[in-house]
Amino acid sequence: MSDLDQALERLRARVDERRRAGDYPPGLEEELASHFEQIAGERLAGEGLTIREQLEREVHLPVVDPERLAAVASSFVPGGPRVQGMVARLLQRQAAGILGQVAALTSNLWRGLEVVAGAADEAIGAISAPSPSFAHLVAVVDALVERVASYERAPAATPEGVAELARRVERLERAEASRVPRPWFRPGSLVEGPAEDPERWRRLLEGCQPVLDLDEEGSASLEQAVDASLGGVVALDLVERLGAQELLDLVRETADKLRPGGRLVAGATNPRSLWGLAHGSAGRPDRALVDPGWLSLCCREAGFSSVEVEWGPAPEPPGGADQDGELRRLVFAPTRYLLVATR
Amino acid sequence: MTAVHQVLAAAAPGDATTNAALDLRRALRSRGRSEVFAAHFAPELAGRVHPLADFARLAGRTDRLVVHVSIGEPLLTSFLEERSEPVSVLYHNITPAAAFAPWDPGFARLLDEGRRWLASLAGRAEVAVALSRFSAAELGSLGFRRVLVAPLPVDPRRLRATVPDLFWSVRLAGLDGPAILHVGQVLPHKRLDWLVMAYHALVTHLLPEAHLVVVGAQRQPRFAAAVRRLVADLNLPRVHLLGPVAQSVLVAAYRRASVLATASEHEGYCVPLLEAMAFGVPVLARAFAAVPETLGGAGVLIPADDGPLVAAEALAGLLTDPALREEAVDRGRERVAALDPAAARSALAGALLGAA
């Protein structure tokens, strides 16, 4: 018997002790099981109910006298129609949000769709042939009408109150209309760093055939490849476009697809170069900063036996060469790096 | 070059059968051509999984079909009737229909059909591979001639490399007490109701500050509603039903968990047990179906006839007794360290192709 089994024996004995001492109420487990059986019984008993009966069990709407429908139509309160118009606009805005949430909910609860479909069938039947269901629908509509009518009777329904409410609604709508998302960067101001020399990566992959260029073929093509079938994989413009998890997955997938000795050549902006960050594409919202140290670690974790970083060309410093040396190293560090990982 | 294609009833992201098929494809592709076809699949798997209807167009010459069996699907049944290739069955196990019958009679019928379909394959399959000895015994009883056992190539260490979701990491870190984690779909045979009863006893009589975090899709709405009602009736505000989550959120949950607990009464394998062990989380489970095999003595196994109170005491022990906790965590780490996914993948592929 293992230590864990012995521990379980002790725990079981402790339960018996607690029972004898009255720490656990007598019959607790049976009571809990019985309670759940009762819940299950109630849930399953509802199966045979109509949609309206189920709604009546779950939803409690205020019941309003159908006579009130006429009360709204005959209202002579000053400003009443205008208030109702604004209330309708507000309700419309609210309804759009609520409907959006309902849509999200029903997409998750596919069972809910059955209920909605059943309710729609029943409603259609109710409208075409007056029945108790129709009276229920009228009661629901009454509740909404009563809610709208109550705005009329509110103190705000004076001419000044109405004008203030109108101003607020218009201000709200103006504010929304002006809230157009604007990009926080100006694409035209971006200047790409020194272009990658295609000859350079070709040299790095000499003798590593076949080579899969992920920039050309797309990362999905990697998955199609047979394990350990590739000699080289090139990704000069891809890794910065990936999320953290996607990058990890890509490196692992590449490691699987490369044969022993095969090479991954991945390029990215060097986040340690202030010049590169200021003038390259690294600040764009669709790009991530990929530190060469992090990428190297990912490659080692994925099983690459050798990982080296080759720095790209450094930019030409503008305005003469009289800057302080330390500052030059900080600002004018190479803007790009090439990672070379060998299986 | 051989061509071995896999067919399954349905494929969805995160689904254990789908994951197994995609993982197995790697091993099969190292031996030749191999694709995965499904009668139904989620759109996000397009390109990785092909429609079964496109089999004739995409598969080409086929040397063998690997059929994943986990539920009945008439489209798959009729597809196989029209094909003449040799068949290997990979049995993931089919949940007994009785667990679903009161909650979802339609689904229970599908499970029954699946079991009948499985039995009908006994005469045709050259080899049937079960993921556990528990499932192998069932295949043997159905008359399969050649039954092999090959566990899933699980690599929970790989999950550890997943970046945890920041939002959920912060939210779960904010829980003011130990967190008991349950990972699995909210379905009748998983007995979340039983676990809630054990948790109720725990927080009422032993450890009031404990939380219960439940991760998994609520695929059976009536059962899920009944569980939610039980939680409400028992006044358990520290129960958190997260629903289906992304892998990054699952990792955040594992990193926060104090204990992984499952009350499931039917599992063909139960991968979350191994995943929890990889994160150094002690495990509590019940001795049903293939759970004891998967656990491998690396956690507290509650015998099938013990009630929720014993589970509550065991949870309290794992949360408060450092020696017991350390023992369970160490055993778990040893269990995970002994897993060799590459060897398991190769063994599984070898078993399925063994008849070739």
Image: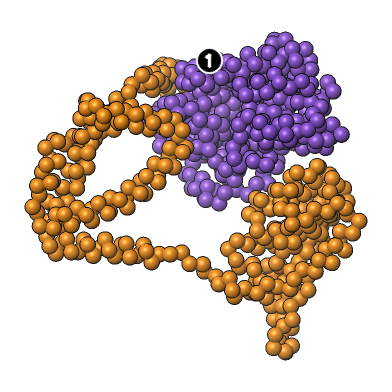
Chain colours: A orange, B purple
Q: Position of residue A9 (x, y in %)?
A: 59, 20
Residue appearing at x 88%, y 54% in the figure: A208
Q: Residues within 10 Å of mark 1 (few under 14, many from 20)?
A: some
Q: Position of residue B103 (x, y in %)?
A: 46, 20
Quadrant of res A227: top right
Judge left or right: residue A109 versus residue B76.
left
- Number of numbered discs overlaid on the protein picture: 1
Quarter of the C terminus of chain B within the rendering: top right
Quadrant of res A136: top left
Quadrant of res B322: top right
Residue appearing at x 11%, y 60% in the figure: A158
Tag 1 residue:
B98
B73 shown above or below B232: above
Judge left or right: residue B145 versus residue B71.
right
> Closest to the observer: B97 or B44?
B44
Judge left or right: residue A158 versus residue B315.
left
A205 shown above or below A283: above
- Amino acid found under the numbered disc labelled 1: Ala
Q: Position of residue B181 (x, y in %)?
A: 54, 35
> Closest to the observer: A161 or A292?
A161
Q: Position of residue B297 (x, y in %)?
A: 68, 25
Residue appearing at x 61%, y 18% in the figure: B114
Seen as rendered, the residue at the extreme right is: A207
Judge left or right: residue A231 versus residue B233.
right
Mark 1 element type: helix
Evaluate whether residue B132 shows in this view: no
A289 shown above or below B122: below
Residue appearing at x 73%, y 58% in the figure: A215
Chain letter for the residue marked with disc 1 in the picture: B
Quarter of the N terminus of chain B within the rendering: top right
Evaluate whether residue A106 shows in this view: yes
